[in-house]
Amino acid sequence: MNTRLLGSFCVFSLACAAGAAPASFATEVQSSQPALWYRFNEASGQIINYGSLGASYNANTFNGVIYNQPTSGGDTGVRFNAATQPYIESISAVPVSLTGNPSFTAEAIVRIDSQGALWAPMLWWGTNPTGTSVWFSIQGNNYDRFFAGFYNSGLRTVCRTKQSVWYHVVWTRDSNNGTNDSLTGSKFYINGQLAEMTRDESLFGAVSVNVASSKFRIQKAADLTRFFTGGLDELALYQRVLSAEEIQAHAATLGFGIEAKFCPCDLNNDCLVDDMDFSSFVKGYNLLICDDPAMPFGCPADFNSDGVVDDSDFVIFLAAYNTLTCE
């Protein structure tokens, strides 16, 4: 399988197997030593924690979480149907090291199939008051933006993502020895690429972070079930900040390339297709080698994924030029 050029535009069905994690992805995750790691390979029963925190952080499912959903390479994940508002909860509360003002990395493979509700979390822990809970989630009621932050304050992605497409998303959060506020020290990666973030304008500005203890939850917070319809696979949490190189190594195994971006011709990730992108396109024109190991996502300007940047890609670029719909 060519992991650089494989894409996924499938609309969800039980038979849709394009997208999530091959065995090589699991090898990369294991090498980064996660504390919490839900592979979601179970057919029933408790969700197993494969991370270093052990079996006391296995998780139970509620309200009809759907098991054994095919992803790719024989792997499986879980599916959520917003109509039943399902959620997942760990047996034990988070360790002390993840309370207060912690540093960590959260990672997931996720596909949002329909509009969500109330910052539906891929991973959450903490309590209700401002600044006391961690949110690795979608943004607001949207299906096309992600959120990384804390209760009532955080960052959202600027460029939109697509509906019913698998994404590899990673949030690294450096607390700077407990001194950073809710808007400082965070980076967000989509498919291995650093994503532009801005303050979520619907919430407060910077607030102090003092995360309280609770159980880990997926699609539920302290007070409400917060939900989206879609799929989730390979959720991992690390008690340190992963490097960009580690994140790129994880993403490179998946094959989620340029075609999964909302605006494929936006080569500099500023949510606009303009002259700066044209300059990047020109540099790649007639590039015949799109499997260079130094380019983990192939040729970014190979918009039709045929292994060469040529006039057919230029036609695609012209159709997108000066579009303002990326944001």
Image (tube, rainbow, N blue to C red):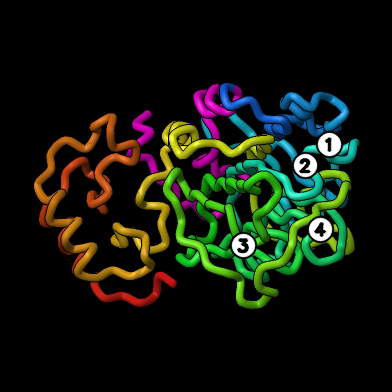
Q: Residues within 10 Å of mark 1 (few under 14, many from 20)?
A: few
Q: Secondary structure at mark 3?
A: loop
Find disc 4 in the rendering and name its residue.
132
Q: Secondary structure at mark 4?
A: loop
Q: Which residue shows up at 79% across the image and 38% down it?
A: 97
Find disc 3 in the rendering and name its residue.
183
Amino acid at circle 3: Leu
Quadrant where the N terminus sits is top left
Find disc 1 in the rendering and name its residue.
95
- Indicate which disc, 2 or 3, sits on the residue closer to the N terminus: 2
In the rendered view, tell whether residue 298 sits above or below residue 204: above
Residue 316 in view of the camera:
no
- Indicate which disc, 4 or 1, sits on the residue closer to the N terminus: 1
Residue 26: image x %, image y %?
A: 57, 26
Residues at discs 4 and 1 in contact (Cβ within 8 Å): no
* 3D distance between C-alphas at marks 1 and 2: 6 Å
Q: Which residue shows up at 66% across the image and 73% down it?
A: 205
Residue 234: image x %, image y %?
A: 63, 36
Amino acid at circle 2: Leu
* 3D distance between C-alphas at marks 1 and 3: 23 Å
115 is within the stretch colored magenta: no
Amino acid at circle 1: Pro
Predominant SS along the magenta part:
loop
Q: Secondary structure at mark 2?
A: helix
* 3D distance between C-alphas at marks 4 and 1: 15 Å
Magenta-drawn segment: 1-30
